[in-house]
Amino acid sequence: MKRFLVPLLVTGIIVSVVLAGCMPTAAPPTAPPTAPPAAPPAAPPAAPPAAPPAAPPAANPLIPWGEDFAVKPDGTPYSVNFAIVWLGDEWCQSAVGVGTSLLERAGAKVTSFDPNLDEAAQIGWLEDQFALTPPDVLILHPVSEAALLPMAEKYEDAGIPVFNFDLVLPSTKVTCRVSHLFKDPEIGTGLAGKFFVDKAQELGKPLKVFFIWGIRGWQMCQDRFHGFTAITDQHPDLVTVVESADSEWSPEIMANLVTDAFTADPSLNAIFAMGGMPTGIVSALTAIGRLHPVGDPNHVIVLSHDLNPAAESVMKEGNIDATLDHMSWDLVQLIDNFLFYYVVLHQPVPELHYEPMVVVTTENMDTLQIYGVDVDYCHYPWNEWDQWPVMDFSTLGYPPPTKAMRMQYAGY
């Protein structure tokens, strides 16, 4: 496979991060036995026959565990600190919004902090919390895996379990880590490489793909690149990759990169953005006269990496072809569910879980589901996190926990 590098020709950097890790998932641990059924209530007084009420949905009740599930035997709530990398983008907003909503509806007390991409600020907040008001649990989305690792291990050494998601800490001391494994060719960003190989075969012509980097220095960006090229390197006759300079996750920088690259090399006919800012791509293609709808012979094939409202919008407009489903709300729901099992039910949880990704297109976005809910979460009411459905992880051996299970395993 031939690769080239297009230099960055812009000076301003506007950071708009969409962050995010998938090796085949290890066999899930055996599900704990279900709690024995509760004794039936006493029969109600006789009443005239009436039509039975409609049965509630079997899956995805809003709060299957009950409002006071995540409390201690004395009734006080478990305290959870939620450390995110920042709140400047939809990925992180939905992570904190959904994750906090599930915990608080279960009765836990959640404290979160936005360090605005500053690893020193995140470390400082964690140090202060540890010294002044140590939580029962820490959920950690680290600004830097290496920089935050000592702090995570400090919490673990003090008996405070750490639940790490997305950017995986390189330590087995961490209680639970959940992510997508980008470098995996089958269930990670290799899916994007396969997408372009398949497209080239379908169209009967080779594709010259402009690969837009996020930040080369980040391990997860390198993993995305290697997952992608693990597939495209096998088909040099079908796919050529031209690498961009760093986009810094900015739609504006991304637009400039596309404009410069496509102006310098009109033979470019495809784009893969390793982040989730396709609006920058669409604006650039429009400006240089290269935007044509999906299906048009002159259409530039575009695949995004993150499923978010912006990607959904431009897909439904027919301007880009597809996106991977890298999103946060499946990862944080897994983290919360594992937290409930470990902290409240005192049950073992996976030390490391890699969640597979899928390719979302206009053809499947309205029907594709994951753990019983729609993959395309963008139509759920933004900021009304309590209305978002709860995923059912029974297939992993971790069905929604209940108070009956708490009685069985924790005795209260």
Image (tube, rainbow, N blue to C red):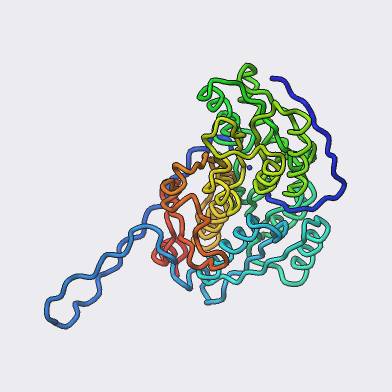
- Residue at image point 51% right, 34% down: 295
**Can you tell which quarter of the image residue 241 is in?**
top right
Above or below, 290 relative to 120: above
Above or below, 70 relative to 210: below
Rendered location of residue 85, percent (x, y): 72, 56
- Residue at image point 73% right, 38% down: 258
- Residue at image point 48% right, 42% down: 28
- Residue at image point 72% right, 54% down: 152
**Can you tell which quarter of the image residue 61 is in?**
bottom left
Rendered location of residue 117, percent (x, y): 78, 56
The image shows a total of numbered marks equal to 0
| Residue 173 visible, this angle | no
- Judged left or right of residue 338, residue 220 is right
Viewer-closest of 299 and 44: 299
Rendered location of residue 62, percent (x, y): 43, 65
| Residue 3 visible, this angle | yes
Q: Residue furthest top?
A: 237
Above or below, 219 relative to 78: above
Q: Residue furthest right?
A: 11
Viewer-closest of 175 and 400: 400
